Image: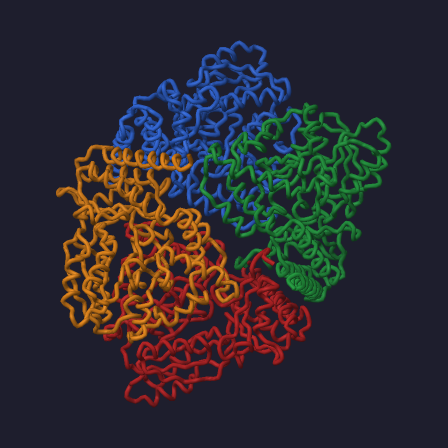
Chain colours: A green, B red, C blue, D orange
Amino acid sequence: MKNGTTHLFVPGPTNIPDAVRRAMNVPMQDMRAPDYPELTLPLFADLKKVFRTESGVVFIYPGSGTGAWEASISNTLNRGDRVLMSRFGQFSHLWVDMAERLGLVVDCVDVEWGEGVPVEEYQRRLGDDKRGEIKAVFVTQNETATGVTSDVAGVRRALDTTGHDALLFVDGVSSIGSIDFRMDEWGVDIAVTGSQKGLMLPAGLGILAVSEKALEAHKQSRMERCYFSFEDMRASFTTGFFPYTPPTQMLHGLRAALDLMLAEGLDNIIARHHRLAQGIRQGVHAWGLRLCAKEEKWWSNTVSAIVVPESIDARQVIANGYSKYRTSFGAGLSKVAGRVFRIAHLGDLNEVMCLAALASAEMSLRDAGARIEPGCGVAAAQEWYRAEIARDLQSLRECAA
Amino acid sequence: MKNGTTHLFVPGPTNIPDAVRRAMNVPMQDMRAPDYPELTLPLFADLKKVFRTESGVVFIYPGSGTGAWEASISNTLNRGDRVLMSRFGQFSHLWVDMAERLGLVVDCVDVEWGEGVPVEEYQRRLGDDKRGEIKAVFVTQNETATGVTSDVAGVRRALDTTGHDALLFVDGVSSIGSIDFRMDEWGVDIAVTGSQKGLMLPAGLGILAVSEKALEAHKQSRMERCYFSFEDMRASFTTGFFPYTPPTQMLHGLRAALDLMLAEGLDNIIARHHRLAQGIRQGVHAWGLRLCAKEEKWWSNTVSAIVVPESIDARQVIANGYSKYRTSFGAGLSKVAGRVFRIAHLGDLNEVMCLAALASAEMSLRDAGARIEPGCGVAAAQEWYRAEIARDLQSLRECAA
Amino acid sequence: MKNGTTHLFVPGPTNIPDAVRRAMNVPMQDMRAPDYPELTLPLFADLKKVFRTESGVVFIYPGSGTGAWEASISNTLNRGDRVLMSRFGQFSHLWVDMAERLGLVVDCVDVEWGEGVPVEEYQRRLGDDKRGEIKAVFVTQNETATGVTSDVAGVRRALDTTGHDALLFVDGVSSIGSIDFRMDEWGVDIAVTGSQKGLMLPAGLGILAVSEKALEAHKQSRMERCYFSFEDMRASFTTGFFPYTPPTQMLHGLRAALDLMLAEGLDNIIARHHRLAQGIRQGVHAWGLRLCAKEEKWWSNTVSAIVVPESIDARQVIANGYSKYRTSFGAGLSKVAGRVFRIAHLGDLNEVMCLAALASAEMSLRDAGARIEPGCGVAAAQEWYRAEIARDLQSLRECAA
Amino acid sequence: MKNGTTHLFVPGPTNIPDAVRRAMNVPMQDMRAPDYPELTLPLFADLKKVFRTESGVVFIYPGSGTGAWEASISNTLNRGDRVLMSRFGQFSHLWVDMAERLGLVVDCVDVEWGEGVPVEEYQRRLGDDKRGEIKAVFVTQNETATGVTSDVAGVRRALDTTGHDALLFVDGVSSIGSIDFRMDEWGVDIAVTGSQKGLMLPAGLGILAVSEKALEAHKQSRMERCYFSFEDMRASFTTGFFPYTPPTQMLHGLRAALDLMLAEGLDNIIARHHRLAQGIRQGVHAWGLRLCAKEEKWWSNTVSAIVVPESIDARQVIANGYSKYRTSFGAGLSKVAGRVFRIAHLGDLNEVMCLAALASAEMSLRDAGARIEPGCGVAAAQEWYRAEIARDLQSLRECAA
C-alpha cells in the first residue's frame, strides 16, 4: 500500500513542484553576506506582483499564516479596538478567536456555514457606525473549511458607499496566488498569506502585504509585540536583511515558485484554477452530491467541500482514501465534521491529477456505502477538460495564424 | 500545460520512488576507500535474491540493459557459434540483430508479434540438434514492445526433455523484479536486466546474473571484449571494488531500491504487478479494445500494448496524451507503429496512478476519434481494485484474528 | 571565485549534514493523517534527551529562536513582572530589549562584553529580593556575539542558596546540543533553542523545553498571545498534531539530525565541540591574538570571537574572507563591530574543516595588514588535533583489547 | 569521525557542485517524447566547445571512460592493425592492455613512470614507418597515476613532420575540461573523456569526440561491436534520441555542469586549475618532497602524485587521511604503490579546499613518520594563493577603470 505517489488533495500543504523542491535543497549560507540581498530583494518585489499591489509593503515572517494573522492585528490595532468580522467556517472562526484573545472587541456576524462574508450586513453595520468605532473590517476571502469564496471587492464597495475609513483586512491564505485578488484595486490594507498553498512551498513562511494606510495605523498601535513587529522586520523589505535568521532554503524555494508563477502568468494561473475546480465540480454533480458552498457565487476554485449522503460518514470516506488508495482528502472540521470531505485543487496541479482525485473519491465513497455509479464523476470531468483544452489549443492556433 | 506531475507510463525509465531519489543525492566518495565494499557487497547479495539464485554470480556494469545483452554474449560464446533465438517484437528483434553483429549464427524463429517464445518449436529444433551445435537458447521473457510474457520454465523443460545442454539466456530487462522469475529453479544460465525498470532506478546500470555453467563456458570464450569482460569485473563481486569508476550515486539508489523491494517482498511485488495490470486490462476490455498480446497466457504484467481501432492512428493517441494531458505512453515500435500504444505498469506504482493512466488514455483516445464511452475503462478498473483491496484487508484481518 | 564549497563558519545557520538535507527533500504530506504522529511524537521524545529533561515538555514552533524567546515570556509572565537579566553581548541585549517591549520590568545587570552572567551579582540581588518580586531570572548560556559561555549551574546554585523561587530561563540557542546543558539537573524552567545551530538544520523552528513549574506559572499568565500560546500548541506534544500547518520537511530533517546526534551520543558531541574549539583557540593564540572572551572560563566551544590587532578593521578581515576565499566568518556586532571577527565551530564539523577556517582566516588577516606568520595557526591546531585523535584511537584500542 | 564534510581529493569522481547535484534530482521522463531533444541536442553542441572542435562529432555513452576507450578502438580500427602507444603509468598501461585484448598489434614504447609520451621516439618511429602500417597513434594526455601531462601538440607535429596520416587518439579523461586541450587545432581524431572528472558529474558517461577522418576510418572498420558502435549511436548527435535508454538524470547534470563551465569560461577554468595546482606544488616543495612527475614540463594541473620519503609507506599516509581526517587521497597504483600518494585538484575546487588538502596531508604524513614541519606546506600555498588572487583583483580593477 506504500507504492507509488501519494495523491495529495488537502488544502495545504499543497504539492510542491519538483523545481521548487530542488531549489530548496541548498547548503546553508551567510545571511549577513553582502550579496544576500540579491536573493531576498527580488522576492519582495515579485510578491508584490502576486498581491497585485504597487504601493504596499511586503513582510515575510518565518512562521505560518496564523502568525501572519497575528502580525496583522498586533501591529496595527490596539487592545479594545472594535472590529467587524464574520464567521462561517473553521478558519474564519479561528481568526475571530485570535482577535478576541489579542484583546479586540469583535462585532462578529455569524453566517451559516456554506455562505461567505455577508456584504450587505457589513454595509448596514458600517453605515450604522456613525462614530467610526469600527477600526477594521475582516474578510476571509476563501474559507478553506467549507470551500467558500467571499466577495472582497463587495466589502470594499460597502466601505466606500458608507464612507467608512476602517482598515480592510483579508485572509488570503488559500486564495492569493490561485484566486483573483487585487490588493490595490480593492483597497485592501492588509492581506495575509502563507507559503504552503498557492505559493507551492512547504509551510514555514507567513507573508503579509501592508498598505500605506495600515503602516500609518501602525504608528498608533501600542500592542506588545516583538517577533512579529513591523518595526524590526520592516527594514528587511528595503535592505534585504532579516532581524533574525531567515529560513534561507525557503527563500530559495520561494524564488523558484515565483519564477514558475511569473512564467505562467497570474491570470493564467487563476484561469487554470477555475478550470480544474470546475472539472471537480462537474464530477461532484455527476455523483448527485452537492457542495457545502450553497450557491455558485460562493464556489471556491481552490477547495471543494463535498457533502456526503445522509447515511454516510465523511470520515469513513477520508479513511478509505488514505488507507486503501494512498489519497489524502481534507476532513470536515468542527460543525461539518463527518458531513463533508474536501478535495483541494490548488497549486501545482493538472487535469489528470484531478481525475485521479475523483477516481479515488469515487472508490472511497462507494466503499463507505454511497450509491454512486463508478466512473461517472471522472467521465463528467473528462469531457469538461477535453473541451477546455481543445478550446485553448484552438485559441493558440488562431493566435499563431 | 506544465503544471503538476508528469504522468509517466512508459516501460522504462519507470517512476523513481522518492526514497530512491533521495538516496542518489549524495556527495561523491572514494571508490577505493577501505569501507567502500560495505556499500557494494550487500548489493550483490541482495540482487541474487531478486534473480532468485543462490549459485549465480552477479555483475553490475555502468551501462544499460543493451550493454548487459552484449556482455552475456561476448563473455560466453565464440564467433560462429550457433544459437537459437526467436523474434516477435522490437526488443527480441534487437537481440537477434546484436547476436548476428557479434558474429553468432542465429537460428531465428520468427513468430507473429503478439505471441511469445515458441516453446514447442524450440523443443523440436533442440531435439533435431543431435550434434549439439546449438550453444545457447535465448528467451525474451517479457517483450516490451508487444506486452508479451514468454514461458521461460517451458523452455527449460524443452531443454531437459531433449537432453540438450545449450546455455539458457534470458532477457529479463522488463520482467525481473516485477514478474515471476526464478533463475535457479528454471536453470537459467544468464539473466539480463537493467536498472530503469523493476529496480525503479534511472537508466545507467546493466546487470547480469550468471550461472556456474555459464562461467565455465566463459573459459572457452575467445571473443574480443574488454569493457564488458567478466575477467575484469568478476572481482567486484567478491572484493566490492570495481575495475573502473562505478556510478556511486546509482549504487546508493540501488541500495534504497533493494531495501524497498525486500521490505515489500518479491512475491508481494509480483502479486501487485498482476493486480495493477489486471485493472488496466479490465479498462482496455471495457473500451472494447484488445491487447496486442494475442492470448491471456501472453499477457504481460508490466506493460500492455493496446491495439487501437482501425480508423485511429495510435501515434495521435500518444501525442494527445503528451501534449494535452501531461501523460507519457509508450509508442508502438516498428511493425506495430501506429497500431498500438502502450501503458507501462511496472515499478513504483499504485492503483490510483493506474486509474489516472486509464482516464488520460480515454481522453487521448476520444480526442483521436475513438468511440469510447468516457469513464468506462476507469469504472471497470475501479471495481476490480476495490474488490482486490477489500479482499486483501479481509485477509489481513483474518490473519490478525 | 564561485567554485567549490563555500566555507561556512558563521554561528548559524550551520552546515547541514548531507543526510539531513536529503531527509528534508520530501513531497508534502497530510498533516492530519492518522499516521502523522509516527513522525512527530518521537521528535518530542528525542528532543527531551537533547535538553536532558525527563519531566519537561517540549514545544516546536514554526519560527525562530527569537520566536521561542517570545513564547517563553508571553506564556509564563505578566506585564509589569520584574525579572533579572544581564547584558554582555548583542543577543543578551536583544532578549532584554524584548522583555521590555513585552512589558516586563527588567533588572538588567550590564557586564563588560567578554564576560558572562554575573553569578555573584545575581545571588546578591536574589538575596536582597526578600519579597520575591523577581519572577524570573534569565541566562544567556552562550552569548554568540562574544563567544562567552555562562555558568547556568551557578545561577541555579544562587537561586537555591538564596531560597528564591523565581523561574530560571535559559537562552540555549547556540549551546544546546553542542555545549553541556542539563535542564533537569540544573533546574531550568524554560530552555530556548532553534533549529539552525547545534541541531544542524536550516532556520525555521523555535524550540522550547518547559518545566512543570513553568507550566504552572503559565496558568497565571495573562499576556495576550495566540500564535505562540502554550494552550494551542501544548496538545501537539501529546497528540502529535499541530494547531497550524507545521513545516513537515523540517520535521523530517529534525528526525535525521536527531538520529545522527543520538548515534554519536550527546557526551561525544560535547567532547567533539570542545576539541574542535580548542584547536581553533590554539590557532588564535599562535597568531598572538586574543579572544573577546576575557577568561578561559568564559571560552565558548561553539564560537570564538577574535579580537583583531588595533590597527586592523575586523570588517576588512571578514570582507577578505568572503570575497577572496569563499569563507564566511561572523561579524562583530554592535559594540564590537570592527574589533572582532568570529569563527563559529558548531554543528556538523570536523578537524580539517577547522584547519580550513584557520588557513582562510590567516590569509584574510594578512590581507588586512595583520602581521601573522603564515601557517602558524594551522600548525598549532594540527598538532593539537593529531594528539587528540591519536589519544582517541589509543583509547579505542585499549577498550577493544 | 563521521562529522562534517568528507574531504575528497581523489582524481575522480571529483566533487560535484551543488547546482549539478540539484539538477540531477529529477523525476524520470519519456526519452522518446518529442521535446526530449531540447535537452539533448544542446549538450552535444556545448560538449564540442569543451573539446574545442567544430568539425568533430560527439558521442555520449552510458558507461565510463573505459567504455569510451573501447568505443574509440572498436569503431575505427581492425583486428591486426598496428598502433603506436606508450606506457608510463597505470592508465596508459590499461589502454595498451585493452588495445591488445581487442586484437591490435601494439608498438608500445615503455617510458619511465614520471615521464610522458616520448614525442621524439614517436617521431622516429613514424618516420621509420614508410609503409604507413601504423594506423593510429595513442596519447594519454594526462596520466592520472603519476600526475604527468603529455604534449599532444608535439605528437601532432611529429605526425605532420613525418607526413604520417595515422589517426591520433587522445585519452583526455583527466584533462579535458581542466587542462588545455584543442581537438581541431591539434588535429586530434578521437578524444576520450568521462563524466566524473573535469565535467564534475558522477561516473556514468563515457564521452567521445570524433573527427571526420575518424568517421571515414569507421567505414572500413570491421570489428564486432554493438553497444558502443557508432552506427547505432551516431543518430543521437543529430536527432537527440538515443538507441537505448540514456541516463536522463546524468544528462540534466551535464546540462548544469556545462552551464557552470561556459559561465566561467574554458580559459578561466584552465587558468584556475593551474593556479590551484601550483599552490599544491608549492606546498609539496615546502615539505621537501618531490613529485612523481620528473620535470616541470610534465607537471599535471589536475593531479599531483607525491613521492613520500624512503622510510615511509604512502599507503599509511592515505590510511591516516581516510581514517583520522576524513580525507580521501589517491593511492599509488601498481609500480608506485606505497611510494606515492596523490592529491587530485580538479573540478569544482577552490583555494581553501586545497589548503585543507595540504593541512590534512601534513598531518597524515607526520603521523606516518615523515619529518615535515607542521603548517609549512599550507603556508607556502597560502602565500601563492594570496598573491594570485590579489593580482586577479588588481586586473579586474584596472579593467573596470
Give coordinates of residue A139: x percent, y percent: 74, 39
Locate residue A22, reporting x and y percent.
50, 49
The picture quadrant where one finds residue D355 is top left
Give the residue displayed 19% in from the left and 71% down from the top. Answer: D132
- Against C212, residue D126 (above or below) is below
Q: Which of C270 and D317 is in front in this view?
A: D317
Q: Tell me if B153 is positioned left or right of A244 in this view.
A: left
Q: Which of C45 and D288 is in front in this view?
A: D288
Q: Is residue B64 left or right of residue D342?
A: right
Q: Is residue B258 visible?
A: no
Q: Judge whether D221 appears above or below D348 on screen.
A: below
Residue C329 appears in the rendering: yes
Location of residue C206 in the rendering, given as x and y in whole percent from the top left corner = 54, 34
Q: List x then y, in percent, for residue A306.
A: 72, 54
Q: In which quarter of the image is residue C272?
A: top left
Q: Residue C397 or B221: which is nearer the viewer?
A: B221
Identify which residue is drawn at 29% across, 34% down: D382
Q: Name the quarter where the C terminus of chain B is drawn.
A: bottom right
| Residue C346 picture quarter | top left
**Image height check: is A164 above or below B240?**
above
Vertical order, B5 against C212 (above or below): below
